[in-house]
Amino acid sequence: MFGLRKTLGSLFKSGRTDAAWFDTLEESLIQSDVGLPTTEYLMAALRKAAKSEKAASPEDLQALLIDEVSTLLSRLEPNPNPLFMQSAQQPEVWLIVGVNGAGKTTTIGKLCHLFQSQDRSILLAAGDTFRAAARNQLKEWGARNGVDVITQDSGDAAAVAHDSIHAAISRKCDVLIIDTAGRLATQDNLMEELKKVKRVISKALPGAPHQVLLVLDGNTGQNGINQVKAFHAALGLTGLAVTKLDGTAKGGVICALAQTLDAEPKPRIFALGKGEAIGDLVPFNARQYSSELFN
Ligand SMILES: Nc1nc2c(ncn2[C@@H]2O[C@H](COP(=O)(O)OP(=O)(O)OP(=O)(O)O)[C@@H](O)[C@H]2O)c(=O)[nH]1
Ligand SMILES: [Mg+2]
């Protein structure tokens, strides 16, 4: 599944762990967007283990690497995962944000499917008011899931959010998921609009939004870290969904994130997107991810 696997798969099967072997491993980690500090940290741990002969064979080193990365990534694992919490809030409001094309609308379709499998009633809100096509795309996901979508012809995302909260309250929906238009964190006016959407939601329903989820393209590399920081600073993210991890060689960005977000209480990674289909959303599990990355 991960492209990194091809290089590493053969590396961990080779018999010798000489200097060239370590160099190849180091190169692979950097290429997969693990990032320099994390690569250095991991390589130091492996070299030390190899020297002390605690881990001599490639298999031993592979197991050690999986352990190290798993420990690192466990910082990002929510416990419990809000995807599976039946909260007392009704409606529980999810605000979905991120840069253009990250996979927000698709992730909403998948989330909707997941929540429905938990027997929760859902309402969607088309807060991406920039393009009519965006509204239609969300409507398609709504139709696929048999779920209503609140839309407006106006160009005001905050008004849609406001409407949808009242609709969700009066319909007694368990979960309301609000889509937003993609934007760069450097576009100040658009970030202000997003803050306004959040304020309007809080006013319409104190305590909401209960989750502010940043959808991050797993292929964005180190820039993904800046996205997380900037959106978090503006909105107070609670969670991340990292998408397009099917067939990428860049899954390492999650390791870099773990190191960066170390000191932060939030956000955590709730889910990974592994395809375009409705079922292609998996809850984030540090150990599983780590062994998939290096197997
Ligand atoms: N392979 C793969 N493709 C994905 C995944 N998630 C989303 N996509 C695709 O990425 C493209 C963009 O997805 P959207 O959901 O439209 O992204 P968005 O963030 O809503 O985009 P904007 O609303 O334009 O900002 C679509 O072609 C999706 O099918 C994933 O996990 N894997
Ligand atoms: Mg969209």
Image (cartoon, grey):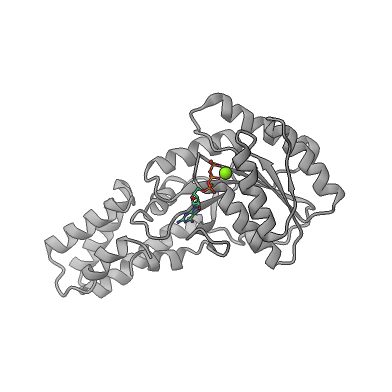
**68 left or right of 122?**
left
Q: Quadrant of the N terminus?
A: bottom left
Position of 87 relative to 197 (above/below): below
Residue 81 visible in the current orientation? yes
Can you give x and y, in whole percent of width and height, for residue 128 in the image? 63, 38
Can you give x and y, in whole percent of width and height, for residue 43 in the image? 25, 57
Residue drawn 57% across the image and 30% down it: 191
Residue drawn 22% across the image and 74% down it: 13
Q: Quadrant of the C terminus?
A: bottom left
Residue drawn 39% across the image and 68% down it: 291
Residue drawn 54% across the image and 25% down it: 188
Front residue (pair 271, 17): 271
**86 left or right of 190?**
right
Front residue (pair 35, 271): 271
Can you give x and y, in whole percent of width and height, for residue 247 in the image? 38, 60
Q: Where, by quadrant of the figure, is residue 23 drawn?
A: bottom left
**129 left or right of 219?**
right
Can you give x and y, in whole percent of width and height, for residue 10 in the image? 22, 70
